[in-house]
Image (cartoon, coloured by chain):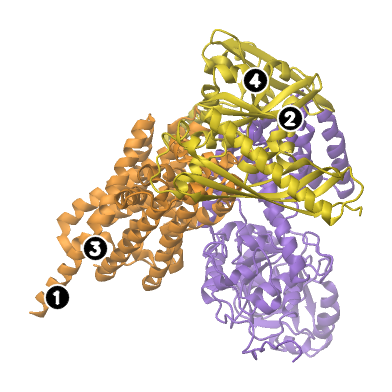
Chain colours: A purple, B yellow, C orange
Amino acid sequence: MKIPFKKKNTEKEALEKVLSKSNDYKNIHFTNEKTKVEFYLTFIASLTDEKIIHKEALPYLLHGELYNLDDVPELITIAETEISTNPKDIELKLFNGYVLVQVVGNEEQLCFFAAQREVGRSIGVPEVEFSVIGPKEAFVESMKQNLNLVRKRIPVKELVIEELTVGKISKTKVAIIYLEEITNQENINTVRQRLQDIDIDGVTDSSFIVQIISDNQNSPFPQLLDTERPDRVTASIIEGKVAIIVDGSPHALIGPTTLVELFSSFEDYFLNWIVSSFFRLIRLFAVTFSILVTPIYVATLSYHYELIPRDLLSALVASRRAIPFPPILEALFLELTIELLREAGARLPTKVGQTIGIVGGIVIGTASVEAGLTSNVLLIIIALAALASFTTPVYRMGNTIRLLRFPFLLFAELWGLVGIVLSFCIMLTHLIRLTSLGRPYLEPLYPPRRQDMKDALIRLSFKNQAKRPVFLRSKHPSRLDERDAKQKQDIDE
Amino acid sequence: MKWVHKILVIASIAFFLNGCVKKEILDDINLIEAIGFDYAGDGNTSGTILYPIYQPDQPPENKTLTAKALIKKSILQDIQLQAANPIVTGSMEAVLFAKELATKEGVLELIDAFQRDPGVGSGLYLAVVDGEARELMDGNYGVRGNATFISNLLENNIENEDLPKTNLQKFLFSYYQEGQTPFMPQLKKISDEKIELNGVCFFKHGKVVETISSDQMFFFRLLVDKYSNGLHRVKIKDGEAAVRSIRSTHNFDLSKRSPLEITVKIKVQGIVNEYTGNEVKPEQIKQLENAFGEEIKKQSQELVDIFKEQKIDPVGFGHFVKTRKRKYDLSKWLESDLKNLTVKVVPDVTITEAGVIE
Amino acid sequence: MSVSIPENKKISPFLVFFVVQKMQFGIGILGFQRIIAKTAGYDAWISIILAGIAVHIVLWALFKMLETVNGDMISIHTFVFGKIVSKIFGLFFILYYLLLTVTVIRTYVEIVQVWMFTDLTTFWFSLIFLIVVVYIIFGGFRTVTGMAFFGIVLPFYVLALFLFTLPYAEFDNLLPILDHSISDILLGSKNMSLTVLGFESLLIFYPFIKDQKKSKKWAHLAVFSTTMIYVYLAILTFAYFPENQLQKNIWPTLTMWKIIMMPFVERFEYIGIANWCLIILPNASIALWCSSRIAKRLFSIKQRTTVPILAFICLIATSLLFTRKQVNLLSDLVGQIGFYLNFFYFPLLLVATLIAKKVKKNEVGS
């Protein structure tokens, strides 16, 4: 194919030099039937929908009254057209699925029209944060669709969707979503600033963003909430948080977040407050149990036999009698086995994964007890701890919980219960120091805020949730307009 | 900054080598569940430890080790010479003293070791053995091991029957309390599978000076425990009844200051468990109440007389006087003042139920 | 002479409650009963109340001083004595808080050594402990306060566990009330005051409080609640032990735990001792923070440099104390210094401050 413009369009020339190596680069010459105006269509075939070009553009360009480039937007039936003289636009637009129209003789002016090919799966059911009741929509990879899911839930003009591009090579589109009248400006600025400051070549998922912009990158705790549920994003935005949606990622990010929020499932809001409070407490117990139970086992068996109730003593000693290893090795062996199973299950296709679970759980478990490698008491404990760690509704948090167990184990082996408390202190200090977008991470536990406690370890009824969380420093602290105070009536009045 | 890393690595290695503390892994130690002391003549004491060997799906096997020593505190070290694993005291449930030892040598020195040991709990049971402690520990009682059997026996008798509350803390409490002397329950081996609680021993300066039978235990408990329960047989004209005291309280009152007189009001609420007569009518109940009251009065008085005679004060009358009289000097209490004390017992028995049969 | 602290580094007034109470409630609670009963016998609970009242008065004096100069201890000293003297006094206080840190850590290590691990090396434990302390202080005063907060809230259940001793309690032990002379009781108060010291750290963190006027109420409430907790514990202890037995136990609180038995835990004192780690960690942090803060105010050295250095000094000092005698000597020394500071020096300082204020006012006036 011959290069048509030699003089001024060096920009395009340079582009063409590289692009002509790619097969999907098309630069096609046409002539209008009526006016005999010659023009070129340039596009990347893999990004554009050829149906649009054939149906919406080409017939009009070939048979319509095309005299010069300014006629193009009027002729074709595509709304998104643009005339530009900036040659730098060429690369940007071409790679966003636009088609470039150039008329021979008028090389300076460029006309683009949109003909993106929309590839992507349809909206599915949330898989990571599945809930039995409540909406079943989940985000997909396409940002357009994701934004649609959010926008249609908040149909007000105050909802702002700011778009940025991140990544030198990947040019990923990132949207910041917030409510103009409600969200604290400082939070928005922090997010915007941090996103703009990202200096990386490629971003393929929101998890890249979360790792780069979190306050302390050396912390195992996730400092932004990631969710695949549009309803959760919507609720968070209305609460006054900032959401980030990354093109190509089915997970939105929400910030600032707190530790307790990472332990609350969105399903909690679908259930009655008494029931959901109960579930939250169970989850809290499960997490504590999961982190502490193996270390406590190691500590008591290695150092504090005095603590063991006398009725349990015989069961414990009898089960440990044939085991050649000290408790720490026994515990590490089983913990690592469980981690191995989980990792293997996660890497394999679902059906094989299930088999692995059964093989691991039943065969390895019983076999190692029978072989005298581990005690059956510990096997129960570890299996329960693993089960408990899966109750965390946020997947990232579950990983953290499982990791946390190991430093605790180490300290338990070292100094028994004192070691466990010491490592707990270290964790606590770390959590107190941690911030999410500059807001305290442990809130409302510390700094203690009574108002935010209403939706923390337990969740009180919506009637009690008339205020937005304090830590968000919202511009509009009250969720409701001035309400008529209901006077308490006496019985039978 | 490389040297910083080097130092860190060296420090953490040193830390894991030196920072560790000695372990007591549960299955690599011998858990003493009970320890018994016998008199071995010539000022020697022999100690026997009882440790279980736990087996899956079976009752634990009772193992004993014995050693003799002149210095009482070194007995454990001497036993250690015979044991393959370190002997630890942390889960001890009972300590037994042979009566001969407790009478001749005293138990204070031995108890002091347990009081000092941070591993020994305060809920430890102490008991005197009528006979040899070693022999008693060699039996085979119950499915959960000998020590558990002994401690359950005592616990059950405290909770449901006549034995006054007792354990290491109670013993130390009354030992250290001015104007009070300690006591211990007394056990006796009947056969290879049976132990019996057959009385209470009273101590003075750490030595047994007096023992009461299990029949008197009920009345002793009424005096010494604020709240108690127990079972006692009462005879009346029409027959004999077993009265279970559900809830008894006692109340001390310093009724006269000089000469000292203490009024002990004992309130017993009971039910009739068995009755050998024909009918239980309000009349009989009244009679039972009176007879029971009379017996309480009589028996308590007898106990107080024993205390006065032996110059002991397990109830703590002296302490009571001290709390009611400012700057009261207790130094001569046991020797002289106790004798001049008058104790008046005022029983108040109410029988509320007579079972489901009318 | 006022000190400006950025708003986001300050703490809410009600958190003062936790910092003040934390400093009063630490390692001393494990063994104070014996010390106060030495002179005042079982009337010592009156001594505690008297000591509490005295603390309230001193606290009032501290607030009065701080309000007058609107700064911290260094500003008060500069205001009254001038710059050079205030530097010397400041050095003394740095040392005082260092000693306090050392005492807290060393006493805890001793308890662990006696009750749990006879062969625990003081050096390695103190090293890890101090690393955590430094980590806390690096988080700023808000983190220190946070640890103080959790150091009170999380182990609070322990107070309820003391009720397990009730079946063995003989409240008659407390009778007859006022069986000891007033001077004995006052001596008991003096001994008690050693355990409730530490609230004077208010002099240093005062500029870090957001709404300083409001914090007064909380500080007093903290002192009141500490006094109540001590009275509660003392009464339970006195009922549990006869006087002679109490005198035999160095840590009566721990001995009391030995009777606690729950279906899932046979013995509580081991959990309790481990838990105490969480209680004394904030104490050491506050003390070391105060020390480094004074250093910063005096010589404008960054806390980031002073804290590790001071922690290192503490580490050396704690490892050099071997016997119980030395530990006792140290804690007695710190107690005595603290006692005279709080109950003699600070009231005098208040008088001096008020005079200085008057004089300066007159100077300005004329």
Locate residue C326, reporting x and y percent. Answer: 34, 32
Residue type at mark 1? Lys
Q: Chain of mark 2?
A: B
Q: Are marks 4 and 2 on the same chain?
A: yes
Residue located beneath label 2 in the image? B148
Q: Nearer the viewer, mark 2 or mark 3?
A: 2
Locate residue B82, reporting x and y percent. Answer: 64, 11
Give me the C-alpha separation between circle 4 and circle 2.
14 Å
Q: Are marks 1 and 2 on the same chain?
A: no
- Looking at the rendering, in which quadrant would you find the N terminus of chain B? top left
Q: Are marks 1 and 4 on the same chain?
A: no
Give me the C-alpha separation between circle 2 and circle 3.
67 Å
Q: Chain of mark 4?
A: B
Against C84, residue C95 (above or below) is: above
Q: Name the outermost residue toward the left.
A: C366
Q: Chain of mark 1?
A: C
Give me the C-alpha separation between circle 1 and circle 4.
81 Å
Give me the C-alpha separation between circle 1 and circle 2.
80 Å
